Image (spheres, rainbow, N blue to C red):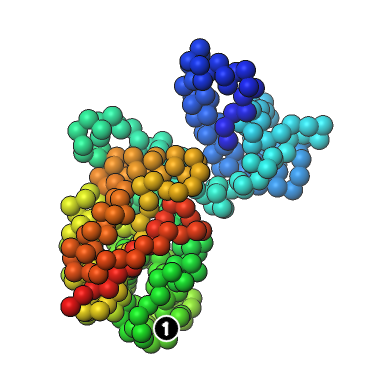
Amino acid sequence: MPLDLPPDEAATLRRGDGPAVQIDLIQTMIFHAAVAALRLGVFGALERGPRELGALAGELAVDEANLRALLRLLVTGGYLAEGPDGYERTPAGAWLAGPDDGFGAVLDFWHSLIGELWQGLEETVRTGRPQRDFYAWLQERPDVLTRFQGIQLRIAEWVEKEVLELAALPGEPARLLDLGGGHARYSLAYCRSHPGLSATVLDLPEALEPGRAAVEAEGLTGRFAFVPGDLRTAELPGGQDVVLLFNVLHGFPALTARTLVGRAVGALRPGGRLILMETLTDPVGSVLEEGFTRGFDLNLIHTQGGRLHPVETIAGWMVEAGCSPPARHDLTRSATLSLLVADREG
């Protein structure tokens, strides 16, 4: 969390009387220290209450003096506090348990991504060409891929109910095509609500495994088909009642994203519905959400050659491809996400 600077120190930096970038340097150190603590099990061990340094070092099987240096930095960062009974988690630290749990998984994932893929960022800005391939990088790191898929699934679980309320399906649909929806969370939700609905999920081969497992766990394998393929080139089955295009377009540059919208509309029957979800370029919310969204946009540019596309631009692509002007629904459960819903005309 941000350093809790005394007012006089903060004012000095705001006036430019000192190097404000020093805060970023210290925060970077704290960021690395927090992930190291996650991976060592520090936050999970302190979930049971305060622990004396020696006992904690023994439980975690780490060097006591080095652990003390790590914990002291986390005290400065606001994640831990030191008292008469030893070290304990603060309310900020209570958000972290382990690298596979809750926000700890998010922190660990971004630590890996930024630490490895953000090298050469200046070259991407200079040349306009991404320096690394995000999905190829994921394939080389199965543990990071699993963490990434888990994060996507938790986002879907958080907003799923609101999505179904805001983007209802027309009539009694029979065929749904989920483009890039490997975890199948949204397809499953719609199929639960519509007993006569069957779904086809098209995504990269490795992205489909979580969806297959989820569908099998719910006993709905007979209503699902999982098709491995590249969204840019795979042949899309036509005559669909509904096409979902959720959190996909930002992975591509504008021309490719525009073409993909056209392909999605082309897969619909006349009167069929396209439901599209994307991250807002300027979310209505806090400075925290604004900061993360702008960092996310830069990450897309650098690691995928994608970017956040304005909702108004995407809506124009939908109309251009043959849809009615879409209805826009900004989600309340996530100030960074918006839904566009439109039917194919003709």
Whether 275 is drawn above or below 37: the answer is below
- Label 1 sits on a secondary structure element that is loop
One can see residue 140 in this view: no
Q: Is residue 12 left or right of residue 193?
A: right
Left or right of residue 235: residue 111: right
Residue 298 appears in view = yes
User: Of residues 78 and 270, which is closer to you in this image?
Assistant: 270
Residue 195 location, quadrant:
bottom left
Crowding near the residue tagged with mark 1, few <14, some 14–19, many ≥20 C-alpha atoms within 10 Å? some
- Residue 337 image offset from top left, x and y in percent: 42, 56
On screen, residue 210 versus residue 120, left or right, reads right
Q: Tell me the residue that label 1 is attached to.
A: 194
| Residue at 51% from the left image edge and 20% from the top image edge | 14
Looking at the image, which is closer to me, 199 or 212? Answer: 199
Q: Measuring 25% from the left and 33% from the top, which residue is drawn there?
A: 125
Q: Quadrant of the C terminus?
A: bottom left
Whole-percent x, y for residue 272 in the image? 27, 77
Q: How many badges with numbers are in the image?
A: 1
Which of the image's four quarters has the N terminus? top right
Residue 263, quarter of picture: bottom left
Percent coordinates x, y for residue 232 in the rendering: 20, 60
Looking at the image, which residue is at 29% across and 79% down? Answer: 241
The amino acid at mark 1 is His
Vertical order, 31 against 21 (above or below): below
**Which residue lies most toward the top here?**
17
Residue most toward the right? Answer: 84
Residue 144 locus on image (x, y percent): 43, 49
Query: What is the quadrant of residue 85 in the picture?
Result: top right
